[in-house]
Image (spheres, grey):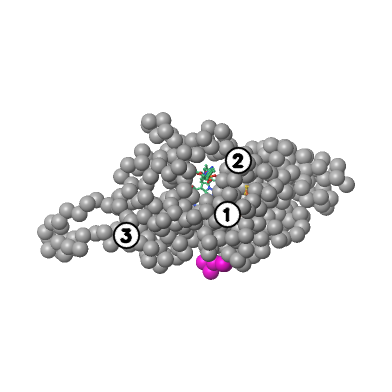
């Protein structure tokens, strides 16, 4: 299994058993406290009324093991904390890629899944087919591959598969690779020998908590999505609450700060996978370009990109907030135009940005 994962391009792979891990007890508390914001898909329940993502046993009772695979998406570009200048935007490292990670990771998972099925097929099955006889009964193997959308908290299984520990910023960190990792999981009915969980190596460090500009890390290992720039710029529809806008800074899609400052990412290796290399113009992008992007250009530029998730007007809204935070009066003319934009949310945020820029100078 691990060899197959490596051959498919994953740097790390491990096996977790299906258990009621103590971290999963945190999930219902997190939902009940409203920490998922408006991400309703996180609150899906099964027919017994339990949260699907909190208990794999009830949603997939056939599952015995979870194969967790991780792939490095770090590229050789600087970190957001190393780049000066508020007059350009920041797209998070995972999103400037050539291809949407859901596709890139799923494609590889399916290769591993196919090899698993091949390895488990009965040795006489092919011969029996050719001879027109019945193959001896092999136990039915069930598997399901997921990237993000499965009924499980992937990071908890990644910990128990030994892929990495859950850091105080809530991300999976690996001692050698850092945290620029995408996760993909294969649920399987096979009882595979589990790996050892990765030990927590955060120690007394609190850099991520100290650096978060919006105090979204409300305590070690606990994130409030409502305050997280990643949530506000990717998942939040409509208006960004006014009191949160300044903290968003120049982020236009996602946020990397709590990973940029992490000492375990100081020497994180860069990937050679072509899918994760940055698209032209997306590292430190021009804000007026994003804010004025036409529907055709948006469709063209962001085909097969995770950035489509924000939708065109969401991305434009984010660019307008960043302009308001830029302190750059050169944006006044474009913001004046956008204050009359046909999208009410973009227009409202442009008026906020105009007021802010004018009051600062
Ligand atoms: C919803 C979601 C988000 C939300 C909420 C994030 C969050 N922390 O939950 C938002 C939109 C904010 C988000 C942001 C990002 N995400 Co996201 N996201 C998800 C998703 C779909 C579900 C996560 C989830 O279930 N959260 C529920 C909460 C409760 O989990 P948690 O915060 O991790 O808390 C756990 C532990 O911290 C622990 N715990 C909680 N409290 C305590 C207290 C103590 C004392 C202890 C010991 C433990 C503990 O238990 C919790 C689990 O129950 C997963 C994919 C998946 N299906 O799992 C991707 C995923 C987590 N995201 C990912 C990525 C890449 C990101 C971003 C880096 C993107 C970006 N650059 O903007 C940021 C990172 C922000 C951050 N610091 O987490 C990757 C993470 C890879 C990694 N190395 O960890 C995942 C796994 C997607 C993938 N397939 O690769 N994401
Ligand atoms: S992604 Fe950004 S806003 Fe969210 S917790 Fe990390 S530093 Fe804070
Ligand atoms: S910055 Fe420090 S506390 Fe935060 S995840 Fe990294 S090592 Fe852990």
Name the mark on residue 224: 2
Q: Earlier in the sequence, mark 3 or mark 2?
A: 3
Of 179 and 210, the residue lying toward us? 210
The CB of the residue at mark 1 lies under 8 Å from ligand 3: yes
According to the picture, the residue beneath numbered tag 3 turns out to be 116
In three-dimensional space, the C-alpha distance between marks 1 and 3, rounded to whole angstroms, equals: 35 Å
The CB of the residue at mark 3 lies under 8 Å from ligand 1: no
Q: Residue at x 58, y 64 (%)?
A: 268
Rate crowding at label 1 as few (under 14), some (14 to 19) or many (20 or more) other CA atoms within 10 Å. some
Rate crowding at label 3 as few (under 14), some (14 to 19) or many (20 or more) other CA atoms within 10 Å. some
Measured along the vertical axis of the image, is residue 26 above or below residue 281? above
In three-dimensional space, the C-alpha distance between marks 3 and 2, rounded to whole angstroms, equals: 38 Å
Q: Position of residue 185 (x, y in %)?
A: 42, 53
In three-dimensional space, the C-alpha distance between marks 2 and 1, rounded to whole angstroms, equals: 20 Å
Q: Residue at x 45, y 42 (%)?
A: 22
Q: Position of residue 341 (x, y in %)?
A: 72, 41
According to the picture, the residue beneath numbered tag 1 turns out to be 202
Q: Position of residue 91 (x, y in %)?
A: 64, 55
Q: Secondary structure at mark 1?
A: loop
Q: Which residues are magenta?
A: 269-274
């Amino acid at each position: 299994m691990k060899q197959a994962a490596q051959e498919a391009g994953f740097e790390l792979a491990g096996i977790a058993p299906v258990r009621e891990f103590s971290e999963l007890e945190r999930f219902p508390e997190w939902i009940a406290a409203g920490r998922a914001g408006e991400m309703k898909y996180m609150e899906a329940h099964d027919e017994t009324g339990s949260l699907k993502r909190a208990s794999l046993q009830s949603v997939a009772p056939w599952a015995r093991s979870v194969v967790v695979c991780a792939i490095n998406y770090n590229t050789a570009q600087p970190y957001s904390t190393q780049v000066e200048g508020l007059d350009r935007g920041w797209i998070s490292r995972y999103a400037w890629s050539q291809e949407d990670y859901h596709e890139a990771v799923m494609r590889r998972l399916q290769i591993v899944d196919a090899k698993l099925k091949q390895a488990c097929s009965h040795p006489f099955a092919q011969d029996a087919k050719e001879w027109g006889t019945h193959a001896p009964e092999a136990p039915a193997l069930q598997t399901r591959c997921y990237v993000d959308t499965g009924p499980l908290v992937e990071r908890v299984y990644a910990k128990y598969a030994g892929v990495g520990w859950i850091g105080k910023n809530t991300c999976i960190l690996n001692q050698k690779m850092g945290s620029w990792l995408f996760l993909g999981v294969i649920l399987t009915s096979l009882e595979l020998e589990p790996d050892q969980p990765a030990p927590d190596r955060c120690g007394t460090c609190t850099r991520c908590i100290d650096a978060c500009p919006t105090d979204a890390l409300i305590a070690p290992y606990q994130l409030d999505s409502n305050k997280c720039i990643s949530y506000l710029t990717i998942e939040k529809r409509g208006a960004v609450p006014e009191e949160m806008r300044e903290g968003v800074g120049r982020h236009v899609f996602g946020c990397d700060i709590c990973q940029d400052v992490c000492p375990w990412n100081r020497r994180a290796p860069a990937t050679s996978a072509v899918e994760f290399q940055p698209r032209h113009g997306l590292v430190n992008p021009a804000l007026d370009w994003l804010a004025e992007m036409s529907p055709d250009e948006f469709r063209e530029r962001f085909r097969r990109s995770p950035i489509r998730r924000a939708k065109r007007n969401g991305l434009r809204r984010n660019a307008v907030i960043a302009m308001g935070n830029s302190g750059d009066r050169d944006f006044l003319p474009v913001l004046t135009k956008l204050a009359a934009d046909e999208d009410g949310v973009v227009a409202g945020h442009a008026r906020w940005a105009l007021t802010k820029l004018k009051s600062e100078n």
